[in-house]
Image: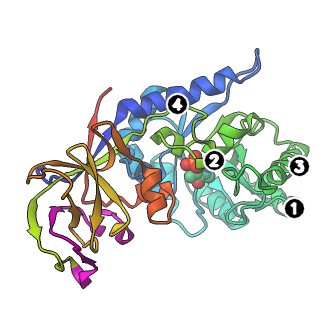
């Protein structure tokens, strides 16, 4: 590969973040109790970092289970050589379920319809299938409604080819410390667990916490936690600083052309940027096809030769322009779009806030054209 825009993914940082979470959990677990297991969330191509290498690194670090969005992602994890159990979060009511059996994936049962489909598929494969039961406690997306379990549970629990291995929920507002829905969801989850126990489901393990919940409340830990964001070295804004983490991904490129423009000349499509004085403009071969938001034009910055310089004009499909007039710049100079150079850093949080988005989206949008290069610790 010779393309000069690439993402560097530090597998050592991922492992170190995993261990930081593990140590955080162990230090706050009461003596004599077992800390919660870590389910490593690697959906959406491991938040853009590359599902296979990331999941294998986290498996080496000790993850007991990894989680992904759908059966297709689960199959990709198995094909990459992942051995630990793979939990599929998504709704499966209209999916082809054969992959669950062929690739030993653990489904979430999140609607009565999915329960029927899973039972039929398990019977066809002559297997007893372990599933995780999802309870909707207020996100109102997937899951059995917490207040309707008397009607919905009997048929599911009677399914002869299904076994409820775990019960879980997902928070809507864990990253918003003041929001009352968080505590309400925890209460509803407690009553859902009681409803299950009263129907004889007592061995199922329990999990609820995403990254934000994990950081803010040990009362959400139960038997396992499900961090995604933290593993990649990022934290929800309201909880930044609770854990020492290392961002795992940086996005790097090189200057491919430099030209001087005169006062009054414009740069790029729609002539959106007009130079108010003579400027030195450098072209970087990374654009919106690589996942760089068009709103970065006139708002974002990059690092080049240890300086912060602005992105000017419209971001185009394959290129963007920077105003490098503040110092020397030559073709071949390294450009950092995300990450560190010369003691400064463009964080994912910074890029997200400049375009009015969230850290998750910045990472997940990194294009498939961008090669991910991995290093060992
Ligand atoms: C994505 C996801 C997580 C991880 O969320 P983070 O905020 O990245 O920690 C956990 N659980 C479920 C069900 C998810 O979909």
Residue 156 percent across, percent down from the top left: 76, 57
- Against 310, residue 81 (above or below) is above
Which numbered disc covers residue 191? 3
Q: Which region of the structure is painted magenta?
A: 269-295
Q: Earlier in the sequence, mark 2 or mark 1?
A: 1
Q: Earlier in the sequence, mark 3 or mark 4?
A: 3
- The 10 Å Cα crowd at callout 4, few under 14, some 14 to 19, many 20 or more, is some
Q: What whole-number distance in Å separates the C-alpha atoms at marks 3 and 4?
A: 35 Å
Residue that mark 1 sits on = 147
Name the residue: 33% across, 64% down. 292
Which label lies toward us, 4 or 1? Answer: 4
Which label lies toward us, 3 or 4? Answer: 4
Q: What whole-number distance in Å separates the C-alpha atoms at marks 1 and 3?
A: 9 Å
Residue 341 percent across, percent down from the top left: 28, 40
Residue that mark 2 sits on = 238
Residue that mark 4 sits on = 244
Name the residue: 63% across, 64% down. 117
Q: Helix or strand or loop: what does disc 2 sit on? A: helix
- The 10 Å Cα crowd at callout 1, few under 14, some 14 to 19, many 20 or more, is some
């Amino acid at each position: 590969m010779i393309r000069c825009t690439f993402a560097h993914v530090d597998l050592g940082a991922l492992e170190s973040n995993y261990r930081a979470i593990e140590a955080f959990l162990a230090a706050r677990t009461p003596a004599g109790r077992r800390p919660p297991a870590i389910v490593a969330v690697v959906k959406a191509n491991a938040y853009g970092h590359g599902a296979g290498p990331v999941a294998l690194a986290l498996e080496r670090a000790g993850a007991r289970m990894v989680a992904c969005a759908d059966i297709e992602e689960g199959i990709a994890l198995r094909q990459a050589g992942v051995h630990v159990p793979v939990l599929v979060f998504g709704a499966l009511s209209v999916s082809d379920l054969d992959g669950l059996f062929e690739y030993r994936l653990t489904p979430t049962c999140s609607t009565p319809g999915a329960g029927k489909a899973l039972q039929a598929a398990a019977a066809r494969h002559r297997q007893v299938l372990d599933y995780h039961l999802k309870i909707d406690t207020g996100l109102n997306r997937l899951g059995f409604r917490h207040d309707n379990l008397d009607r919905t549970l009997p048929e599911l629990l009677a399914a002869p080819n299904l076994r409820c291995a775990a019960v879980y929920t997902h928070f809507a507002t864990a990253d918003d410390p003041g929001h009352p829905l968080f505590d309400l969801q925890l209460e509803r989850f407690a009553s859902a667990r009681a409803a299950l126990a009263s129907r004889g489901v007592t061995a199922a393990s329990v999990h609820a916490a995403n990254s934000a919940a994990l950081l803010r409340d040990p009362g959400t830990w139960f038997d396992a936690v499900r961090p995604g964001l933290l593993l990649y070295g990022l934290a929800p804004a309201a909880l930044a600083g609770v854990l020492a983490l290392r961002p795992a991904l940086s996005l790097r490129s090189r200057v491919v052309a430099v030209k001087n423009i005169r006062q009054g000349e414009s740069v790029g499509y729609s002539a959106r940027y007009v130079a108010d004085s003579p400027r030195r403009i450098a072209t970087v071969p990374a654009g919106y096809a690589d996942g760089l938001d068009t709103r970065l034009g006139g708002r974002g910055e990059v690092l080049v030769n240890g300086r912060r310089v602005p992105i000017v004009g419209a971001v185009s499909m394959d290129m963007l322009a920077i105003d490098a007039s503040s110092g020397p710049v030559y073709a071949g100079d390294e450009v950092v779009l995300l990450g560190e150079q010369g003691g400064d850093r463009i964080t994912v949080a910074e890029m997200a806030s400049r375009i009015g988005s969230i850290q998750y989206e910045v990472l997940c949008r990194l294009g498939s054209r961008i090669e991910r290069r991995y290093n060992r610790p």
